[in-house]
Image (tube, grey):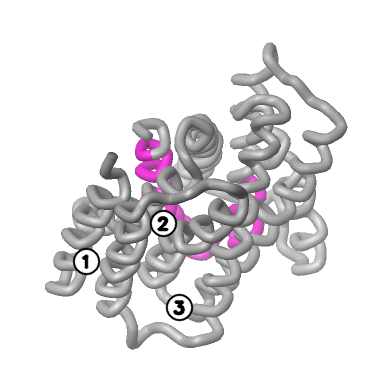
Amino acid sequence: MVYMAAAVILWSTIETVSRGFNGSLAPVVLAFWRFFLGSVVLFVYAAGDLNITRRSLVFSALGGFLGVTLTFTLFHISLLYIRAGIAASIISTVPLFVLPMSWLGGERPRRWSILGVVVGLAGIILLSLEDARGGNMTGILLALGAVLVFSVFTMINRRTGRETNPATATFLSLSMGTIFFMPVILAAGDPLFPRLDMWGVLSLVYLGVAATGLGYLLYFRGFDMVQAHRGSTVFYMKPLAASIFAFFLLGETLGVLSILGIFVIIFSLYMALRL
């Protein structure tokens, strides 16, 4: 569980670091380079232990398209309609989709896990209410679509990891997803090699190497050790961690509802992870 918590904390820095580009990099191009660099990191890590089979390639191609290309295309488009805070909160509802999927897969979540998911959702709603006026149904539906697709990807990647190993499974999914980004970029007509200053280059390297490569490796290594519905609950840390980063690095203040939502989320983690 520690691996997964560390991964979510890394992911929680993505919004803050990405704001430094100030629109100089198209969202889909940013996602492409994030996952390209992340794939390189995972390849270096798993190079001596790659176990690629025909079945793993099939699952990875499907998982890469769903969990990387489609998920982050929907997510970045949703940001054109809703604020980043609302989008981050919606992304944290992944456990609500993973729970019934894991149930159908044969896992039996405990009562405390179910209660933890429900209470966590209440906390996320409280966080979202602070920015509710900036939202709109088109963006919310797009973000929820991204959540649903990523939840399916989570289950597929777990199956791929059993066919090979977590590092290989994650590398294959990210590299496949990176390839599938190319048609989207070509269709949009965005430049693949935009001019960036030193801050932009360092930010992009951080997003790709740490937030994406290391983040995914830690997440799926930890996810393979626990039940799906319990492991996915650490997504509730994202709005909590993102709010803290925004406060200290961007000077964004927290409203009463946000503070209350953070405490509700902490309590939900206790409930969901209770033995």
- Magenta highlight range: 5-33
Residue denoted by label 2: 15
Q: Is residue 131 left or right of residue 64?
A: left
| Mark 1 / mark 3, whichever is N-terminal | 3
Disc 1 marks a residue whose amino acid type is Gly
Give whichever of 135, 67 is nearer the camera. Answer: 67
| Mark 2 / mark 1, whichever is N-terminal | 2
Give whichever of 160, 249 is nearer the camera. Answer: 160
- Residue at 68%, 15% in the rendered image: 49
| Mark 2 / mark 3, whichever is N-terminal | 2
How crowded pointer 1 is (Cα within 10 Å; few <14, some 14-19, many 20+) is rated as: many
| Spot occupied by residue 60 in the image (x, y as percentages of width and height) | 75, 41
* Residue 96 makes an appearance in the image: yes
- Residue at 72%, 63% in the rendered image: 190
C-beta proximity under 8 Å, tags 2 and 1: no
Cα distance between the residues tagged 1 and 3: 19 Å
- Residue at 60%, 56% in the rendered image: 104
Cα distance between the residues tagged 2 and 1: 19 Å
Disc 2 marks a residue whose amino acid type is Glu
Residue denoted by label 3: 82
Q: Main secondary structure of the magenta part?
A: helix
How crowded pointer 2 is (Cα within 10 Å; few <14, some 14-19, many 20+) is rated as: some
Q: Is residue 105 above or below residue 121?
A: above
- Residue at 35%, 32% in the rendered image: 2
Residue denoted by label 1: 261
Q: Under tag 3, what secondary structure?
A: loop
